[in-house]
Image: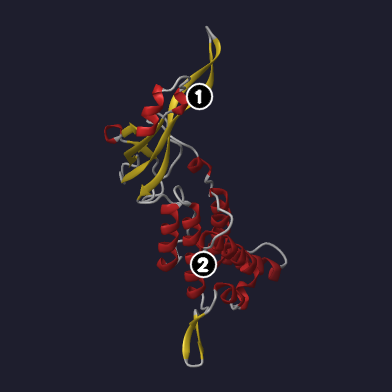
Amino acid sequence: MDRSPYQLPFNTEDVPNWRCPICKVGRLTVDKKSFISQETAASSAAHDYDGWEPEWVRSVFSCVFQCDNKKCGEPVSCCGSGRVETTDTHDEEYGWIQIYTEQFYPDYFFPPLNLMDIPKKCPESVINHLKGSFALFFADPGASLNGARAALEALLTDIGVKRYTTVKKKRRIIPLHHRITLIPPKYEDISDLLLAVKWLGNAGSHDGDNPSKADMHIAYDLLEHVLSEIYDEKGKNLAKVAKKVNKRKGPIK
């Protein structure tokens, strides 16, 4: 999935190609009547300083987006922050000039946007954790990675990897790292990918380097591939076709 549009800000006249989280077909557009923006108190006070520049402006906003698919029309609420930015543009009379535009950066969407392709046969237990991760993607990459880690735990449970063991008659949780080593042999090819998601998830769960949105993109790419390998029929169907071609040593009649 191309997530580059979700790294861009928006304004009321220009919204990146953000897809509706419900129908996954329509594009989100701003309901301008719902749009509210207000400059922060600190930003307002800064106007009194000598040398004030428009780029100092900071604001908060809230609005409702609407899916432009007539068969859907889902409303999606959003809030976040804004700031004034300069853009270089060419004017026929004055040449290159700078213009000021206020750009807005979302922190939260409800319902959360879909940030990776999920196979139809993916279990709800995994999907629910992924949606929790999507909900925090813009505001808190660390917490979002933690949600991806939880989705990995649910995935392992779904493919038959036990989550608990008994030690001296007491039930103990099996650590995620060890669970990955217990995956069925048919999934061994994706064990390294699962381990990479685990390490990224650890960064969101423990103290250390602060994870970034770039780390989230990597985690989603890994999970997207893993889910496709496990739940998407395309790979299995292609394997069957290849087997038939190899058996006939030529075209399938």
Up/down of 158 relative to 48, above or below: below
On the image, the x and y values in percent for residue 136 come to 43, 53
Marks 2 and 1, Cα distance to the nearest angstrom? 42 Å
- Please say whether residue 18 is visible from this viewpoint: yes
- Please say whether residue 228 is visible from this viewpoint: no
* Nearer the observer, 101 or 45: 45
- How dense is the environment of label 1, judged by Cα within 10 Å: few (below 14), some, or many (20 and up)? some
Q: Earlier in the sequence, mark 2 or mark 1?
A: 1
Q: Which residue is mark 2?
A: 152
Tell me which amino acid carries mark 2: Leu
On the image, the x and y values in percent for residue 171 come to 46, 86
Up/down of 252 relative to 213, above or below: below
- How dense is the environment of label 2, judged by Cα within 10 Å: few (below 14), some, or many (20 and up)? many
Kindly identify the residue that appears in the image at 57 percent across and 65 percent down: 198
What is the residue that sits farthest to the left in this orientation? Answer: 33
* Nearer the observer, 163 or 225: 163
Q: Are marks 2 and 1 in contact (CB under 8 Å)?
A: no
Identify the image quadrant of residue 45: top left
Up/down of 82 relative to 232, above or below: above
Q: Which residue is mark 1?
A: 86
* Nearer the observer, 213 or 218: 213
Tell me which amino acid carries mark 1: Thr
Kindly identify the residue that appears in the image at 53 percent across and 8 percent down: 94
Identify the image quadrant of residue 183: bottom right
Q: Quadrant of the C terminus?
A: bottom right
On the image, the x and y values in percent for residue 148 come to 49, 61
